[in-house]
Amino acid sequence: MHFNVIKLLFCGTTPLRNSQVLQVTRKDTSVVYKPNFRISCRLQYISKHSDNMVRLWCFLLASLSAVSAQFVPPYTEECRTGMYPPKGPTSKGAVTWYTIDLDLPPSERWKQIITDKKAELATMIQAIRDLANAFVPSGKLIDLVDKDLPFIVSTLPYPFNEEIKGIAAVSGVPLGEVVLFNIFYEVFTVCTSLVAEDSNGNLIHGRNLDFGLFMGWDIKNRSWLITEKLKPLVVSVDFQRGNKTVFKSTNFAGYVGMLTGMKPNAFTLTMNERFSLDGGYIGIVEWILGKRDGMWMSFLTRSVLENATSYEEAKVRLAQTKLLAPAYFILGGNQTGQGCVITRSRVLSLDVWEIDLKQGRWYVLETNYDHWDDPLFLDDRRTPAMKCMNQTMQSNISRKTVYDVLSTKPVLNKLTTYTTLMEVSIGKLESYIRDCPNPCMPW
């Protein structure tokens, strides 16, 4: 019988001799967490996974201080079929469309969206405040955010800095908290993305956007607090210049970067987080301290969507631009064979994994682990997703069947906020708010 064991000795402000031990064991397919804790002081581990993965998950488990110990079964199921058009308990409806006029001054571009979503944005920001105050009950953490984070805005590239200022002005949310809201997506996005080529050479791009990992577990409703607060903020946006579409995106109101987007008839693009010790936290700290030679991940994706004119140009920019955080860029084009996963460190491209029909690879699929490594056993969305893609077969691939794949647990999970389907050749981007009825994996 095989066990993976991770031990964290933690003490808060007490000496280690008074420390407690958290042990995470894997026996067959069951996982048990015990007990709750706050601050990790020292780390020991026994695992077959890389140091980086173990350290990452130890950090993430440390964020579970507000979550009761619980048994986490492997909530998987047979590949779903007939889920499209979206209906039933897993769909909460289509995402509302807005238009943003890029000819307007940046501070005015988001005015209509923020006016419509003002109450929802305030509710979400309050949930973040409550989480912060749970860790630092004095309220000093939020005071620090309100006092010190606004200075970052002036260091951000134009037009993003002015757009953030405009969002704060319209929403009434303190500028520092709007900055924090935007920073979150550099380090907390856990997703599934794929690009597939059908038998006629058309490219289909699909993604589940999973967000809110370990950010407040609601025991009663079995859901993530921040994930649920984000769902009402999801919007689809047609970015126009001169009354003509430049690109389309599905986004969160109040967030100026891009995680999911399409340049009609040219390319589609999604971004997934890549876990690494040299991760987004380090890049953000370096930026605050004055080292600003890297680009914010979501600002790069927006810049590429707005300015790149072809799949090849987008691929070069995504592969070569220095970043604040490591990432996976999943890119689809408008010609046969144009689909790839770009695996990025903060400094360079580590790999470009492309569709290759000669090798029988008619799709590429990425979650949050390097495709040449096994995913962590606690978070294997890749295996069921690939199983369903292979079962579907290239001859049957379409937006409908991709939606089926993305609706299969645990690809669909408690973190999933929305599903997007894109077909570049017809300029189609459609997004749907999701829900994962119990039983369902937390991630």
Image: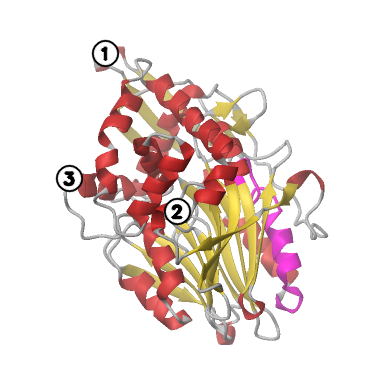
- Depth order, front residue of 339/23: 339
Q: How many marks?
A: 3
Q: Estimate the x, y position of residue 172 in percent, counting from the top left.
A: 45, 35
Mark 3 packing: few (<14 Cα in 10 Å), some, or many (20+)? few
Label 2 sits on a secondary structure element that is helix
Q: Which mark is residue 108?
A: 2
> Bounds of the magenta span?
394-416
Q: Which quarter of the rendered picture does the C terminus lie within?
A: top right
- Callout 3 amino acid: Leu
Q: Estimate the x, y position of residue 2 in percent, counting from the top left.
A: 52, 41
Q: Which residue is mark 1?
A: 14
Q: Where is 362 relative to 65, above or below?
A: below
Q: Which residue is mark 3?
A: 289
Q: Are marks 2 and 3 in contact (CB under 8 Å)?
A: no
Mark 1 packing: few (<14 Cα in 10 Å), some, or many (20+)? few
Q: Estimate the x, y position of residue 15 in percent, counting from the top left.
A: 24, 14
Measured Cα–Cα span from mark 2 to mark 1? 51 Å
- Callout 2 amino acid: Glu
